[in-house]
Image (cartoon, rainbow, N blue to C red):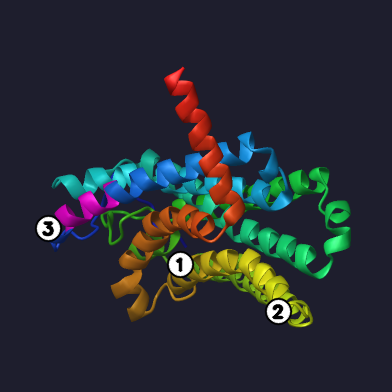
Amino acid sequence: MFTICNDSHSDFILLGFSDKPYLEKTLFWVILIFYCLTITGNLVIILASLKDPKLHIPMYYFLSNLSLLDLCFTSSCVPQMLVNFWGPEKTISYTGCAIQLYVFLWLGATECILLVIMAVDRYVAVCHPLQYTTIMHPKLCLQLAVLAWGTGLIQSLIQSPATLQLPFCSNRRVDDIVCEVPALIQVSSADTIYNEIQMSIASIILLVVPLIIILSSYIAIAKAVLRIKSTSGKKKAFGTCASHLLVVAVFYGTVTAVYLQPKSHYAHEQGKFLTLFYTVVTPTLNPLIYTLRNKKVKGALIRLGRRTWDIWNN
């Protein structure tokens, strides 16, 4: 049974690293730099994907979706994070916390599904190259993108209200840097077993199952690549998949540690740093990973830069 609280819609306090004020000042500047890089890098990839005809293929369509997703994901929490790290004021309104929770869950779940779709796209490209354009036609790509964004939204609309309905009473000190489900569950004054079960089920559906599908896709890809006789062919095939695998490892490695072990000592002590990583660092790394390892993207960025330079000088 839920406890009735008179101040159920009062402000929350995001403690962050308040016990280490010297660390918060350093993190403010580090996060600000990463946030600027995230905005710049992802905007450039979106513009390159839209403007360059050579990137008008499914792989880069999904990459531009990932860039848009990362832009929105990091913007849903970093501005508030910077405000909290800059000064002693750590409060966030109930409405602000609710909005952040809804958006955070929506975009986080969407990224889980989108990474699966990108893995399947690479599987079709490597294992069925002759049928690739027939299978991954524009209509299907649009439907898959809508599926990813829609699934994330449904997940948020299910889990966010259940979390916000918990009574928090006088304990509104959230030991985290953002309003996310594990941290809010920990400060509730009620029995949270239903919420923990719900979160575990959601984690299995959105983290474990997608990860199994991704790994299965890449096992099939590896088998197909090993059958290629030419060394250059193998190198090209592995090159198209390495970037995505690296993104998957970085994202899933940190998110699963937070959401699959919400009550453990490890998650409690290290959870804030892991959250910081997948909300700030990962969205910055994604554009770098894809551009540094992809000749087509680098070529598109060079052409975009030249066109921009010509426009400025005319």
Q: Is any part of residue 189 visible from this angle?
A: no
Numbered disc in front, either 1 or 3? 3
Name which residue type carries label 2: Ala
Residue 307 falls left or right of residue 56 = left
Vertical placement of residue 105 versus 42, above or below:
below
Is residue 175 a member of the stretch shown in magenta? Answer: no
Indicate the secondary structure of the residue bearing disc 1: loop
Residue 62 in picture, x, y percent from top left: 65, 50
- How far apart, in angstroms, are the residues tagged by discs 1 and 3? 32 Å
Residue most extreme to the left: 22
* C-alpha distance separating marks 2 and 3: 48 Å
Residue toward you, 243 or 102: 243
| Tag of residue 21 | 3
Magenta segment: does it hold 28? yes
Disc 3 residue crowd, few under 14, some 14–19, many 20+, Cα 10 Å:
some
Span colored in magenta: 24-32
Total number of numbered labels?
3
Q: Cβ–Cβ below 8 Å for labels 2 and 3?
A: no
Residue drawn at x 53%, y 66% is: 199
Q: Position of residue 182 (x, y in %)?
A: 42, 64
Q: Amino acid at mark 3?
A: Pro
Disc 2 designates what residue?
Answer: 222
Task: Please give the label number shown on residue 192.
Answer: 1
Residue pictured at 47% horizontal, 50% vertical: 104
Dot 1 and dot 3 residues touching (CB under 8 Å)? no
Labels 1 and 3: the sequence-earlier one: 3
Task: From the top left corner, tell me how far across and down residue 180 is, in percent.
Answer: 42, 57
